[in-house]
Image (spheres, rainbow, N blue to C red):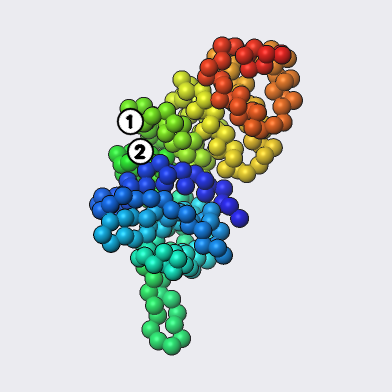
Amino acid sequence: MPHPYDATSKDLLDADPARWVTYLTREPPPGPVDVIDADLSTVTAEADKVIRVNGSDPWLLHLEFQANTDRWLVPRVLKYNAMLYEKHELAVASVVVLMRPAANMPAVTGSWAVPNPLGSPRVFEYRVIRVWERPPEEFLTGPLALLPLAPIAATDRTGVSAIVDRIRGRLGAEADRPLVAKLWACTSVLMGLRYESAFIDRLLEGVLQMEESTTYQALLARGEARGETKWRLVEARAIISRLGTKRFGPPPATVTAALEATTDLSLLEELGDRLLDARGWDDLFPVA
C-alpha cells in the first residue's frame, strides 16, 4: 500500500540524486548516479528509493523515509538491503530518514543485532537521520533538493517564516520554473507532517503570490498526500477561487456555480494551470 508521503520523497530524490549522495556520504560520488527501479517483486516498489552510484566500484544507496512508527521498520530495511544485493549483486548502504517525532522509535539506532540461534548475532548497520533534530541551516545551505526539509527541522513555529523566506530566495536565484514548482509542492506536503493547513496556507500565500500556478500545484499536492479525492476536489476549487480573485476580482455567481459543478479533478488541475495566463474569469469559463 503506498504511503501518503512516498511520492514526495521520490520527488526529492529525483530532483538531485547526486547531491543526496554527497549529503549522506559527505563526499561527491566518484561517478554518475541514477535513481533506479527498485521493483523487488514481492516488495512493493513504492516503498523503495534507490540510487546507483557508479564508478570503479559501484554500489547502491537505499533510502527509507518514515513518517510514523512501525515496529517492523528495521527488519524491513534489512530485507530490502538483502534483496537489492541479490538482484543487483552490488553492495548496498541503507539510510532511514525519520521525518517527525511521531516516527521515532528507540530501537532505530543505526545497528541491529539480528538473533542467531546457531552463533553470535549478525549485526546489520544502517544510517539514521532524524530530521527534526537536524539544524535548519544544514538543509538551507545544502543542495536545493534538501530545502523542503528545512521547515520540519529543529525549529519552532516562530522560525518557520524566516525559513520559508530563505527557501524562496534560493529557489528564485538558483532553480528553473519546473524545479521551483516541484520543490514548493514538496515543501507544502512535508510541512503538513508538522503544522496545520491554515498555518501552512498563511505562510505559503505570502511567498507564492506571484506564482499562482506553483501555489496551486503545491497546495493540491498536500491534498493528494491526504489521499482523499473529495478533499482534493474541495481544495482545488478553493484554490482556483482564491487565486483567481487575486487576479480578476471576485468570481461572478455563474463562475462559482460552474466551479462547484466540476467534479473532474483533472479538469480542475487544468484550470489551475491556466490561471497564470488567463486574462479574466471568462478565459477560464467562457460559457459563464
Q: Quadrant of the C terminus?
A: top right
Instruction: Decide: few, some or many residues near mark 2? Use Cα within 10 Å; few <14, some 14-19, many ≥20.
Output: many
Left or right of 155: which side holds 79? right
Residue type (three-letter) at the residue carrying disc 2: Leu
Mark 2 residue element:
helix
Residue type (three-letter) at the residue carrying disc 1: Glu
Mark 1 residue element:
helix
Left or right of 220: which side holds 115? left
Instruction: Please say if 233 is above or below 118.
Output: above
Q: Quadrant of the N terminus?
A: bottom right
Instruction: Please say if 238 is above or below 100.
Output: above
Q: Dividing the picture into quarters, in which one does residue 249 lie?
A: top right
Residue 205 in the image: state x and y as whole percent. 50, 25
Instruction: Decide: few, some or many residues near mark 1? Use Cα within 10 Å; few <14, some 14-19, many ≥20.
Output: few
Residue 152 in the image: state x and y as whole percent. 43, 43
Question: In percent of the image, x 52 and y 66: which residue is there?
Answer: 72
Question: In percent of the image, x 64 and y 32: which residue is there?
Answer: 266
Residue 233 in the image: state x and y as whole percent. 67, 33
Residue 179 visible? The answer is: yes
Question: In percent of the image, x 37 and y 74: which residue is there?
Answer: 123
Residue occupied by mark 1: 174
Question: In percent of the image, x 35 and y 38: which residue is there?
Answer: 144
For marks 2 and 1, the one nearer the N-term is 2
Q: Dividing the picture into quarters, in which one does residue 61 lie?
A: bottom left
Q: Dividing the picture into quarters, in which one does residue 263 lie?
A: top right
Residue occupied by mark 2: 144
State the CA–CA distance, disc 2 to disc 1: 8 Å
